[in-house]
Image: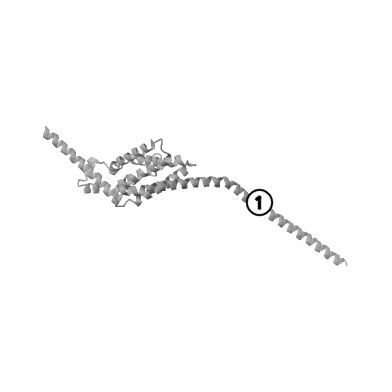
Amino acid sequence: MESSDKSIRKQGERAEETKRNIAESAAKLFTARGYDAVTMREIAKDAGCSHTTIYLYFKDKEVLLEQLAIPPLQTLETLLLSIQAHEEWSEAEKLKEKSRQFLRFCLSHKSMVAVILGVKSVRVDEKDPEGDVNKLRNRIFGYLTEGIEHFIPAANEQERIDQSRIYFFMLYGMVFTYMNSEEPLEPLLKRILPIMDKAIEVLLAGMLHKRDSSQLVTAVKPETQQDKKQGKREKLEKQEKQEKQEKQDKKQDKKRKDKKSKKQEEK
């Protein structure tokens, strides 16, 4: 009985090891060659198992992707929600801390971040994307950007999306600038997180300035356009008046000449 239990335990350990090897091989190949270019047979070969064995653990590449992406994304989601729960923090401070943790997350998963965040991804502003991975990705996108929406309310949906994209361009710029850095994680973060904070401050200040400038332009613009139209009308009226006066002058001049000519003929 004891030897039977031991055998079952070993089988379970081997199965977990095989499953782990398959996931690691998938992550490596997806990162190196792209999700669509890699086949299940190639993953099995890299993992050291047969192409039939791999289907005992994962029915297709999409299930493999979920296995690789969902657990770390769930951890990140939990962290972002815990930051949002700090009611004593300002929205700007929450946004900074969420950005710091997102940067830490990405640089902690350098070899996998392209798979976790990018493979089979959809537009981050899609309300109800297909697949559990993309639903989770888009929720995380919402947690990250809601600070901007609270800090600088958008005038419409397109402006909200644009503001979110600008923030993400900056955030991803920080991530991929240091993606290939060989500097140890903690010293690297200690050096670049203050830069991240400054970047957030500059971004928010710029958005606020643009909003205030836009409001000023919007307030002045109708009057300016009206002035232009009025000026154009006045110019046309003046031109028409001048042309009319010129015609009258020519007509009067012709009458005088005709009259003078007639008098000369009578003499």
Which quadrant: the N terminus? top left
**Among all residues in the image, which is located at the extreme top?**
1
Can residue 35 be seen here? The reply is no
Q: Percent x, y for residue 43?
A: 24, 47
**Among all residues in the image, which is located at the extreme right?**
267
Report the residue at 38% width, 39% height from top: 139
Seen in the picture, residue 230 relative to 249 is either above or below; the reply is above
Report the residue at 25% width, 46% height from top: 24
Report the residue at 31% width, 49% height from top: 187
Q: Which residue is mark 1?
A: 233
**Amino acid type assigned to the residue bearing label 1 in the image:** Arg
Q: Is disc 1 surrounded by few (<14), some (14 to 19) or many (20+) residues within 10 Å?
A: few
Give SS at disc 1. helix
The image's colour scheme reads one colour
Pick whichever, 266 or 134, lies toward us. 134
How many marks the image carries: the answer is 1
Pick whichever, 113 or 56, lies toward us. 113
Q: Please identify the quarter of the rendering in which residue 263 is found.
A: bottom right
Left or right: 18 with respect to 154?
left
Can residue 76 be seen here? The reply is yes
Q: Percent x, y for residue 140?
A: 37, 41
Seen in the picture, residue 151 relative to 31 is either above or below; the reply is above
Which quadrant: the C terminus? bottom right
Seen in the picture, residue 258 relative to 39 is either above or below; the reply is below
Q: Percent x, y for residue 147?
A: 42, 41
Pick whichever, 231 or 237, lies toward us. 231
Q: Please identify the quarter of the rendering in which residue 130 is found.
A: top left
